[in-house]
Image (spheres, helix red, strand yellow):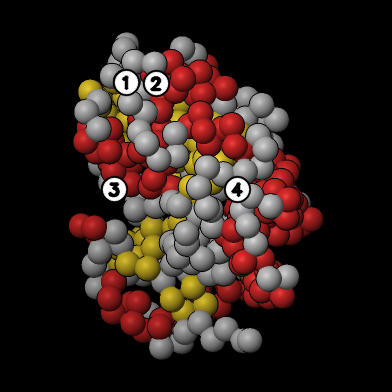
Amino acid sequence: MSRSKTFFTAGPAELYPRFEEFLQEFVDLQLGSISHRSQQFKDIYQHTDEQLRELMNIPAENAIMFTGTASEIWERIILNCTELETFHLVNGSFSKKFYSYAASLGRHAHKMEKPMGEGFSYAEIEVPEFAELIATTQNETSTGVQTREPDINKLKRGNSSKLVAVDMVSSAPVPEIDFSLVDTAFFSVQKSFGLPAGLGVWIANEACLAKSEEISTKSSIGGHHRLPELWKQSRNYQTPSTPNVMGIYLLGKVAEDMNNRGIENLRKETDAKANKLYKYFAGKEGFSIGVEKEEHRSRTVAVINTERPSSEVISALKERNLIIGAGYGPNKETQIRIANFIANTPEQIDSLIKAFDELF
């Protein structure tokens, strides 16, 4: 089946090149009908678990658990890993939602907030004394701002008694997160893993589990997908409730393929494509880069200012079957967003740049 359109949207996004092949395998093996208590499912979970550990260098002592979405994990982390206070680095719409989830669950939620398009460096961050959790967003999808891995690592080293959570929804598996330091991280599959939406992946360490068990003796940690239950089941490659078997299977196949290609190769290719995009738009009349500081520019979602209405730019490219995204929220008409996920090949990036040359 040929694909007429190329998606540079920030999620759902361009499908992984071998997606159709893996999906057909799933159908041919009739895996959509198997019991999630069967050995067959356990084998699928185990394969995906092992491939993700290899791909992202996740330690054996950390659990890899599955939920419906990454947004659900915001709530799971607040309920299971905090009792009173949280601290959030907010620099866009999604990091702000994490903060708002904490407030809505009755936590005393602190935030350090930056204007759209600005990022955080470790030296400027002051963590409140009694915050139990530091919530960071490695890649803010709405603004194209990244928090560099060394800054996240320093944040944990400087606050060893607090749990550190990393939202890596629109960047995983590209960033090199140090899971021997970071306590919990999460992502969904419809971004750089190039899969349809409907699966969240939650990585957590034993400190998170201990905190959850401690809180559960005093107050509620929720009823659905409680961390101790997810953790216990994951150790047997099981889930508390019926999971997205297809999503878990496909994620395992994509992660295996990425391991075969080599994560370092994929990171280098991602960086080369990002550099090409940013260099082009830095010199393109009528356009400019949305994030001023180079070290804070996302490697996977390029946000570009446009003097034309974004709807005009999007419409013209759509005529050529090149699908890009509008700016997010208040920047909908003044910015465009271009995904640079693993599924977006160097040739596709070149085609997009060529179209910009010819159209604008």
Give the number of the disc on residue 216: 2
Using a 10 Å C-alpha cutoff, classify the residue at mark 4 as few (fewer than 14 neighbours), some (14 to 19) or many (20 or more): many
What amino acid type should be assigned to the residue bearing mark 4?
Pro
Using a 10 Å C-alpha cutoff, classify the residue at mark 2 as few (fewer than 14 neighbours), some (14 to 19) or many (20 or more): some
Labels 4 and 3: the sequence-earlier one: 3
Using a 10 Å C-alpha cutoff, classify the residue at mark 1 as few (fewer than 14 neighbours), some (14 to 19) or many (20 or more): few
Labels 2 and 3: the sequence-earlier one: 3
Q: Is residue 308 left or right of residue 268?
A: left
Q: Relative to 184, does residue 320 appear above or below in the rendering?
A: below
Q: Give me the residue at 29% from left, 59% from top.
A: 328
Labels 4 and 2: the sequence-earlier one: 4
Give the number of the disc on residue 195: none
Q: Please name whichever residue, 56 or 76, is drawn nearer the observer in this view of the structure.
A: 76
Using a 10 Å C-alpha cutoff, classify the residue at mark 3 as few (fewer than 14 neighbours), some (14 to 19) or many (20 or more): some
Q: Please name whichever residue, 199 or 6, is drawn nearer the observer in this view of the structure.
A: 199
What amino acid type should be assigned to the residue bearing mark 3?
Ser
* Cα gap from disc 1 to disc 4, whole angstroms: 35 Å
Q: Marks 3 and 1: CB-CB under 8 Å?
A: no
Q: Marks 1 and 2: CB-CB under 8 Å?
A: yes
Marks 4, 2: nearer the viewer: 2
Give the number of the disc on residue 219: 1
Percent position of residue 11, x then y: 44, 62
Give the number of the disc on residue 173: 4
Q: Is residue 348 left or right of residue 41?
A: left
Q: Give me the residue at 55% from left, 78% from top.
A: 351
